[in-house]
Image: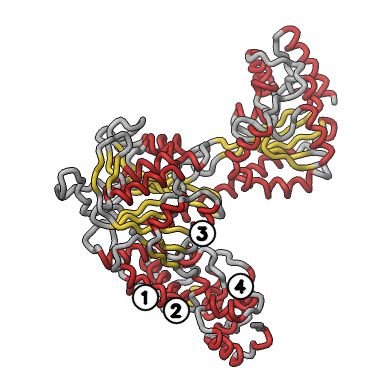
């Protein structure tokens, strides 16, 4: 208490006479000087507080920091509830975005806006642990009378900065605050430990996100074979960029700065528009994990030479189009009844000169069928894909229809053909067509009916001849009823329809695909091709695979990359799968390679998922109901089933 009285006298002397006396720590004295020069009034009783809408926006902007820090804050709040303290998390400007701890202390903090939405930088509320730690860039504790504003002196606070584990940029502050007369002297060490724990968690999350981004890049490398791809994380950090990409962008060291300016701090929905201004000849694909954008791929489309005009008003087809690669129906892996039926139907309709609508859940392999349809009818023509989802309306329009010089700010000075022109003589593949903006649907319909495309900003039409293959994971008929999709466009694009079965409907195709993905991953990572244990096979068969073939591939590629042994892949090598799949798999004898045990586990899991309904179970396993009844009898499972 004697020290606090001495500091209080030093504070009063500074306010009345403008001079510093001995007593306060140097960092505190320097902060008082800054506060005086910035015109902070010492009788301020509360920090400014933003409104709920702005708080929501800022919390959304810092959602990754919040998501990583919240478990740490919740754990520490149980300790602090007994210590009459609370723990606060702020953004990089000192705005509080989360609070936890002793409920009475949290409630008491509202008086000074020491709560969510409060802005606690020095220029607004004077010397305080949050604002001073931000200014100094290091941990600091501010005790009672060391605060610049009188009413805030009833608090003591300890704060430590949180830095990005990659570039060490300041992300926010973790602060422990409590009544000055009950504040624990170890709070500063605790705050520093919490900040370090959050940084470590951020580092682990960053590594995992970068690995997923690179896996996504590898999976897309063959799709955009003729293009260069930049891989950026959610803060605009360049995870991968080839030398050719850097050369084409003429960027050098500025590439990282430009990428950061496009992405960092912006909502994912704005990334495409921001990147279009910096990289006008590129398209952007968001990469999400559990619905959260973890980064993106920026595709710098290849510079293709034309082969000369075929008609006077017509742009020649591109000899090599973005993502060109050949796929035949025979090359599509799958031997289940469901897959045999869909490949047979696709082979028949591929020869027809009609638009095709390919339907199916995300990740089932719709684009493989689109490429096989192209290969069957126009093997020498280009295959030009465009994802209509995840892009701003203007970007979809410029990508699809192209544009002329000066059509918009940042446009290529020579103009640029759109994907429709590039597909001339081949196949235009529109993925996620159900997400195409409603007004652009009318323009697409006009092109399909007239065979003429107009670039943005131009009144001169270009004749085009292409086959349209559309893909969707939505129920377009329901979208029509909801007035989100044009009925006339639906009839135009869906002359023939092809539904691709979900992986859970394909039975043991799961194991065929698994072995294929494991071989490819082992070759890419320079490892031996491992064998699958019986328990792992049962786990793969039992899992419902909501992400379908794409999920299976990503899981197994990650498993091969991180496997503990070269010769064997086990259940322990897999990323986390739903508990039910693991339990079902373990019902088989893990030490046995008995295929009956594996089959029994898979059928049990599927029966359980279908509520014991044999008809639905048979449909999802891709076998006849009579066949399933026979297998149930052989395996002694009849009592588990119902019709």
Q: Is residue 444 visible?
A: yes
Q: Which residue is mark 3?
A: 475
Q: Residues within 10 Å of mark 3 (few under 14, many from 20)?
A: few
Helix, strand or loop at label 3? It is: loop
Which residue is outermost to the bottom? 634
Q: Is residue 431 left or right of residue 227?
A: right
Sequence-wise, the earlier of marks 3 and 2 is: 2
State the mark number for residue 85: none
**Which of labels 4 and 3 is toward the front?**
3
- Marks 1 and 3, Cα distance to the nearest angstrom? 23 Å
Q: Position of residue 342 (x, y in %)?
A: 41, 73
Q: Nearer the viewer, residue 321 or 511?
A: 321
Q: Report the residue at 76% width, 45% height from top.
A: 77
Q: Position of residue 462 (x, y in %)?
A: 24, 44
Sequence-wise, the earlier of marks 1 and 2 is: 2
- Marks 4 and 3, Cα distance to the nearest angstrom? 32 Å
**Looking at the picture, does residue 320 appear above or below residue 587?**
above
State the quadrant of the N terminus.
top right
Q: Position of residue 336 (x, y in %)?
A: 44, 79
Q: Residues within 10 Å of mark 2 (few under 14, many from 20)?
A: some
Q: Which residue is mark 4?
A: 582
- Marks 1 and 4, Cα distance to the nearest angstrom? 35 Å
Q: Which residue is mark 2?
A: 336
- Marks 2 and 4, Cα distance to the nearest angstrom? 24 Å
Q: Residues within 10 Å of mark 1 (few under 14, many from 20)?
A: few
Q: Which residue is mark 1?
A: 344
Sequence-wise, the earlier of marks 2 and 4 is: 2
**Which of labels 1 and 4 is toward the front?**
1
* Colour scheme of the rendered structure: secondary structure
Helix, strand or loop at label 2? It is: loop
Q: Are marks 3 and 2 in contact (CB under 8 Å)?
A: no
Q: Is residue 201 left or right of residue 151?
A: left
């Amino acid at each position: 208490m004697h020290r606090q009285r001495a500091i209080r006298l030093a504070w009063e002397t500074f306010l009345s006479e403008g001079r510093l006396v001995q007593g306060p720590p140097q960092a505190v004295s320097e902060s008082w000087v800054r506060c005086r020069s910035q015109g902070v009034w010492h009788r301020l009783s509360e920090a400014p507080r933003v409104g709920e809408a702005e708080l929501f926006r800022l919390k959304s902007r810092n959602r990754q920091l919040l998501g990583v820090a919240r478990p740490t804050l919740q754990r520490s709040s149980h300790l602090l509830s007994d210590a009459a303290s609370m723990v606060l998390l702020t953004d990089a400007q000192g705005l509080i975005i989360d609070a936890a701890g002793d409920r009475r202390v949290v409630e008491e903090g509202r008086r000074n806006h020491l709560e969510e939405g409060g802005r606690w930088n020095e220029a607004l509320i004077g010397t305080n642990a949050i604002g001073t730690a931000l200014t100094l860039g290091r941990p600091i504790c501010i005790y009672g009378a060391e605060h610049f504003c009188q009413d805030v002196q009833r608090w003591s606070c300890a704060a430590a900065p949180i830095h990005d584990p990659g570039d060490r940029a300041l992300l926010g502050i973790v602060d422990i605050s409590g009544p000055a007369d009950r504040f624990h002297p170890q709070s500063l060490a605790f705050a520093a430990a919490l900040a370090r724990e959050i940084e470590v968690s951020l580092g682990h999350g960053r590594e995992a996100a970068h690995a997923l981004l690179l896996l996504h890049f590898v999976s897309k490398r063959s799709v955009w074979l003729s293009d260069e791809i930049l891989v950026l994380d959610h803060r605009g950090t360049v995870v991968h960029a080839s030398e050719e990409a850097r050369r084409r962008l003429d960027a050098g060291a500025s590439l990282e700065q430009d990428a950061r300016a496009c992405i960092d701090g912006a909502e994912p929905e704005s990334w495409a528009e921001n990147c279009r201004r910096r990289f006008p000849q590129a398209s952007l694909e968001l990469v999400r994990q559990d619905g959260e954008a973890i980064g993106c791929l920026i595709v710098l489309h290849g510079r293709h030479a034309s082969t000369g005009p075929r008609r006077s008003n017509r742009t020649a087809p591109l000899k090599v189009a973005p993502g060109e690669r050949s796929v035949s129906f025979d090359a599509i892996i799958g031997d289940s009844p469901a897959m045999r039926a869909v490949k047979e139907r696709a082979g028949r309709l591929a020869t027809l000169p009609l638009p095709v609508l390919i339907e199916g859940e995300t990740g089932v392999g719709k684009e493989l069928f689109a490429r096989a349809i192209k290969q069957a009818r126009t093997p020498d023509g280009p295959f030009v894909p465009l994802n209509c989802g995840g892009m701003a309306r203007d970007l979809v329009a410029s990508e699809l229809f192209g544009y002329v010089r000066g059509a918009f700010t940042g446009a290529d000075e020579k103009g640029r053909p759109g994907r429709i022109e590039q597909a001339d003589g081949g196949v235009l593949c529109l993925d996620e067509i159900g997400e195409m903006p409603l007004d652009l649907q009318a323009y697409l319909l006009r092109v399909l009916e007239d065979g003429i495309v107009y670039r943005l900003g131009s009144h001169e039409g270009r004749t085009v001849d292409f086959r349209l293959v559309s893909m969707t994971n939505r129920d377009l008929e329901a979208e029509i009823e909801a007035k989100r999709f044009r009925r006339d466009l639906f009839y135009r694009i869906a002359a023939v329809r092809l539904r691709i079965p979900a992986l859970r409907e394909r039975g043991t195709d799961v194991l065929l695909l698994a072995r294929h993905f494991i071989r490819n991953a082992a070759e890419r990572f320079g490892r031996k091709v491992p064998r699958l244990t019986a328990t792992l096979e049962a786990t793969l068969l039992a899992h419902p695979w909501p992400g379908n073939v794409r999920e299976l591939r990503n899981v197994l590629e990650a498993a091969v990359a991180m496997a503990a042994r070269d010769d064997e892949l086990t259940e322990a090598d897999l990323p986390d799968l739903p508990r039910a799949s693991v339990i079902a798999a373990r019902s088989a004898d893990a030490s046995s390679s008995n295929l009956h045990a594996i089959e029994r586990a898979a059928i049990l899991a599927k029966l359980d998922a279908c509520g014991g309904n044999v008809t639905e179970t048979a449909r999802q396993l891709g076998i006849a109901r009579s066949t399933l009844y026979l297998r149930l009898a052989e395996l002694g499972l009849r009592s588990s089933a119902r019709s």
